Every structure is written in structure tokens, then in C-alpha cells.
Image (cartoon, rainbow, N blue to C red):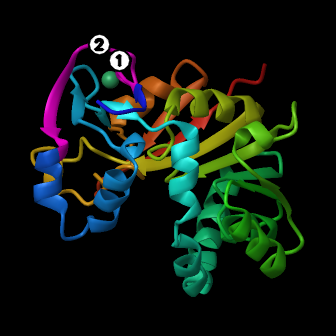
């Protein structure tokens, strides 16, 4: 053990019934070809590393036995090259988000929208085009700069949800493929719930470690990519994490290994 915070409870449901699934060395041997960069980052900075992946006996969530300190993760994402890749796909991503927001708008009455982890702003712009007053929050300052340039009619915040002005709430909050990245997912869920206005809706997606195509052999699953992905939830795990904060949680059907959830907040 060389750094980071130990996790001795399931970050989804809180259970202490945990079993080791594979070690870091086993993961390296199975994933080295595709995950060479992640391995190198962990070798260079032991604070980014883990010793083993654990599985929760209660909800099936799969997670690293320790999580990097925020400063180490900040350095890791500072060297991240995802923004250029997103920019190359801006048109198709905007189309996908516009179709999704067209459906989601039917589930809420209010028209205040926030995308958490908004990247270069495609979902924010898609929400605006569907009639929302749209905002995005994103820790990558370079991505926010691109969003402001391409989609200037929206509001943007740089940072995590800590940077959201106190008391700001939205009728629809979207959080797509973010939960698996953060060192403290329960804290993020509480912050997401706080950002949803009474009667509002959270739409959240994250990979599904309980899906029949990956459950039996998680070592070969590409989503097992620390230090980017630290917690791989299941349908039960997401439900357990959201239930204390929301009035009603609906897990949508998905043939692929991804959890998609609508979480409704009570009116008061
Ligand atoms: Zn659990």
C-alpha cells in the first residue's frame, strides 16, 4: 500500500461484505496492451495506484480498494487528452444529445438544465435547443473554453459541483459517465441531489458491472480502467446509492453493460 484512501465499505450501498476479485498485477497482465498509459501513470505516481479490485457481496459493485488523493487525480486529468477526441466528434455528439434531451424534456415540467461533467458543452447546447435555460459544470478549463466558443448562449462553471453557487437548483440534472470516475461517489450523489429542484429529475448513466456480458470476467472488460474508473456500479448499486436522496428511482432497460437511471425528487 503506497497512498490514497482505503475503502473498506461498498461505495454504493455501504456493505462491508467485500471480496477480492483480482490484484493489480493480474489486471496488468490482462489489460496491458490497451491500458499501457494507465499502468505507466500508476507506476510513475503510486498515489494513483490500487492493490486490488473488490466486489460487494450485497450489490455486486466492483471497485478499487483505495482511491487517489484529489491532488494526484488532478495531475492525472491535467495530462488527459480527451478534449481533442471530443472535438472531432462534436457534430454526432450534439445530434445524440439533442435526441436524448428531446425525450428527457417530456419527463420534467421546469426548464432549468444542468449537465455535470459537461465537457465541450454538447448536452448543454442540446438542452438549449430543446427549450431549456441550460448550464454546464466541468472541471477541465480547456473543455469549458471550447464550449464557450462553440455554444456561447449557455452558462458554464469550471470545477466540480463544489463550484456551483450555493442554492442553485435545476429541474433536470444530467450526469453521464461521471460517477465511475470520482473518488467519493456517495458525496457526488448527495451533491447531485442537492442540485435537483423539488419535483425535478436526475438522469444518470454509468457502466454496469452486473451485466451478464461482463460479470463473469471483469478482467477483460474495458471499463475496468483505473485510475479513470474507480467504481463500477451495478443496477442494484446505483439504486442503493440514489435511494436515500430521491423519491423514486427508475432503472431503464439496457441491452448493453450500462446503467441508465431516472431519479425523481419529491416536491418538498
Ligand atoms: Zn454494495
Q: Quadrant of residue 256?
A: bottom left
Left or right: 250, with 53 as reference point: right
Q: Quadrant of residue 234?
A: top left
Q: Which residue is mark 2?
A: 16
Q: Nearer the viewer, residue 261 or 44?
A: 44
Q: Which residue is mark 1?
A: 9
Total labels drawn: 2
Residue 70 location, x and y as percent? 57, 39
Question: Going 13% across and 39% down the picture, which residue do you hit?
Answer: 22
Residues at badges 1 and 2 in contact (C-beta under 8 Å)?
Answer: yes
Vertical placement of residue 147 versus 35, above or below: below
Residue 120 location, x and y as percent? 68, 71
Question: Going 44% across and 45% down the picture, which residue do you hit?
Answer: 180
Q: Dot 1: what SS?
A: loop
Magenta span contains residue 22: yes
Q: Dot 2: what SS?
A: loop
| Quarter occupied by the N terminus | top left
Answer few, some or many: residues within 10 Å of disc 2's Cα (few below 14, many 20 plus, some between 14 and 19): some
Q: Is residue 110 visible?
A: yes
Q: Marks 1 and 2, how far apart in space?
A: 5 Å
Which quadrant does ligand 1 occupy? top left
Disc on the earlier residue, 1 or 2: 1
Q: Which residues are magenta?
A: 6-24
Q: Is residue 213 visible?
A: no
Residue 246 location, x and y as percent? 60, 25
Q: Residue furthest top?
A: 16
Question: Going 76% across and 24% down the picture, which residue do you hit?
Answer: 267
Left or right: 211, with 98 as reference point: left
Amino acid at each position: 500500500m503506497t497512498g490514497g484512501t482505503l475503502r473498506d465499505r461498498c461505495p454504493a450501498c455501504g456493505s462491508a461484505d467485500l471480496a477480492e476479485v483480482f490484484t493489480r498485477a493480474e489486471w496488468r497482465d490482462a489489460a496491458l496492451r490497451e491500458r499501457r498509459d494507465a499502468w505507466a501513470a500508476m507506476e510513475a505516481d503510486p498515489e494513483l495506484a490500487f492493490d486490488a479490485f473488490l466486489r460487494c457481496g450485497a450489490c455486486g459493485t466492483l471497485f478499487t480498494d483505495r482511491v487517489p488523493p484529489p491532488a494526484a487525480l488532478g495531475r492525472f486529468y491535467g495530462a488527459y487528452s480527451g478534449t481533442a477526441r471530443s472535438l472531432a466528434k462534436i457534430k454526432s455528439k450534439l445530434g445524440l444529445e439533442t435526441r436524448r434531451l428531446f425525450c428527457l424534456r417530456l419527463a420534467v415540467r421546469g426548464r432549468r438544465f444542468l449537465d455535470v461533467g459537461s465537457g465541450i458543452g454538447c448536452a448543454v447546447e442540446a438542452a438549449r435547443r430543446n427549450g431549456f435555460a441550460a448550464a454546464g459544470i466541468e472541471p477541465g478549463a480547456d473543455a469549458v473554453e471550447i464550449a464557450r466558443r462553440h455554444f456561447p448562449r449557455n452558462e458554464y462553471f469550471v470545477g466540480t459541483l463544489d463550484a456551483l453557487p450555493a442554492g442553485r437548483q435545476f429541474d433536470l440534472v444530467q450526469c453521464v459517465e461521471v460517477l465511475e470516475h470520482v473518488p467519493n461517489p456517495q458525496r457526488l450523489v448527495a451533491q447531485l441531489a442537492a442540485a435537483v429542484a423539488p419535483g425535478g429529475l436526475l438522469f444518470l448513466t454509468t457502466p454496469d458491472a452486473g451485466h451478464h456480458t461482463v460479470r463473469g470476467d471483469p478482467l477483460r472488460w474495458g471499463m475496468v480502467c483505473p485510475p479513470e474508473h474507480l467504481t463500477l456500479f451495478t443496477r442494484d448499486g446505483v439504486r442503493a446509492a440514489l435511494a436515500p436522496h430521491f423519491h423514486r428511482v427508475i432503472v431503464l432497460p439496457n441491452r448493453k453493460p450500462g446503467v441508465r437511471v431516472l431519479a425523481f425528487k419529491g416536491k418538498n
